[in-house]
Amino acid sequence: MFKRKTRPPSGVQPIPRRAGVTSPSQVPVERLRLTVMQRLDGLLAGDYGGLFPGHGSERGEARPYVPGDDPRHMDWAVTARNHEPHVRDMIADHELDVWIVLDSSSSLGFGTGLTTKHEIAWSVAGAFGLLASTGGNRVGAVKTTVADGKSRPQVFPARGGSAHTAAVLSGLRAEPSEGQAGDLAGSLDLVARAARRRGMVVVISDFLGEDGWERSLRHLASRHEVIVVEVIDPREVDLPDVGLVAVVDPESGDQRLLDTGKVSVRDAYARMSGERRAELSSAFKRAGTDHLVLRTDRDWVLDFVRFVSSRKSRLMSARRSA
């Protein structure tokens, strides 16, 4: 009996059912697997309940409201009866769709610390993907790409299995090219359409491109649990005193000379950077997402563990209150 072969939808990258480690592209994935599993082993005991609980699709029991709870989970009927604010937790689903949105704009190729921003972004995407696959979740990904002025994101469908996760991470491995911008808003909208089941979405970017993604992020967070990972470089926070330097926008190619020897220039740069950090933090809070900041001059695994531990503690305290 012959089976008819079908082509994948436009923009969706076919994933092999079995991916070994014989391909050179698989080698970095296996190295990352060893790094993540060895360093996180024992540090994230019971990580499934702390990292991938999801909001769930079924309503659980109501409990008193505590500061930090999502107001969208308010149970107004119980609140009216008890004359005290109550929220209703959701029963966690045990087979979630975990989507990873990886920014591929040229600005992520920059790095003056231990590595580049893209290397950090890909590594943390691999950490989320590998940990999700060990819990039996399905992992999918979207890589933001703009070619010839048109948004052409790469979409990897959500499937289960460690082999599929390794193939997805291999597809996300390529370094961003010069003059390449990322359509973050379009990628978030694409995930909102593709993720039919309630699950978790991890958005990884430096958020240095054009704005316009906040509305898409709020829409995505209204249905899914969203974790935003912001990757920054120390030179994007403050400038050293190295005299006259030429700075280049990797996406547009625009160049500008800066005299870093002037205190006023360095102070203005630090002030604008601080304002930008505050704006992003406020935008993530308005969207109701978790926010993780990773730097190229720090050990990203330690920051990742601290984030997961604090997140787990917050969820466990909420369950104890219930």
Image (cartoon, rainbow, N blue to C red):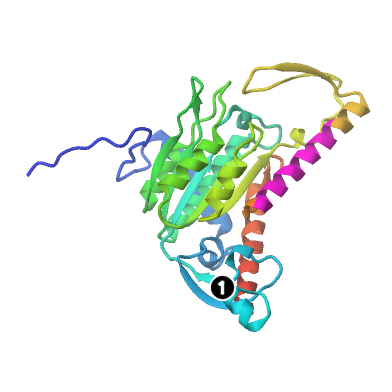
Q: Is residue 83 visible?
A: yes
Q: Amino acid at mark 1?
A: Arg
Q: Position of residue 208 (x, y in %)?
A: 66, 33
| Residue at x 45%, y 29% (from the top left corner) | 152
User: In the image shown, does 79 or 99 lie closer to the viewer?
Assistant: 79
| Residue at x 63%, y 29% (from the top left corner) | 107
Q: Main secondary structure of the magenta part?
A: helix
Which quadrant is the C terminus positioned in?
bottom right
Residue that extends furthest to the left in the rendered view of this protein: 1
Give the magenta-colored segment's residue range. Answer: 269-286
Residue topped by disc 1: 88
Residue that extends furthest to the right in the rendered view of this protein: 263
User: In the image shown, does 187 or 297 lie closer to the viewer?
Assistant: 187
| Residue at x 58%, y 21% (from the top left corner) | 179
Does the magenta portion include 248? Answer: no
User: In the image shown, does 83 or 221 lie closer to the viewer?
Assistant: 83
| Residue at x 46%, y 33% (from the top left corner) | 153
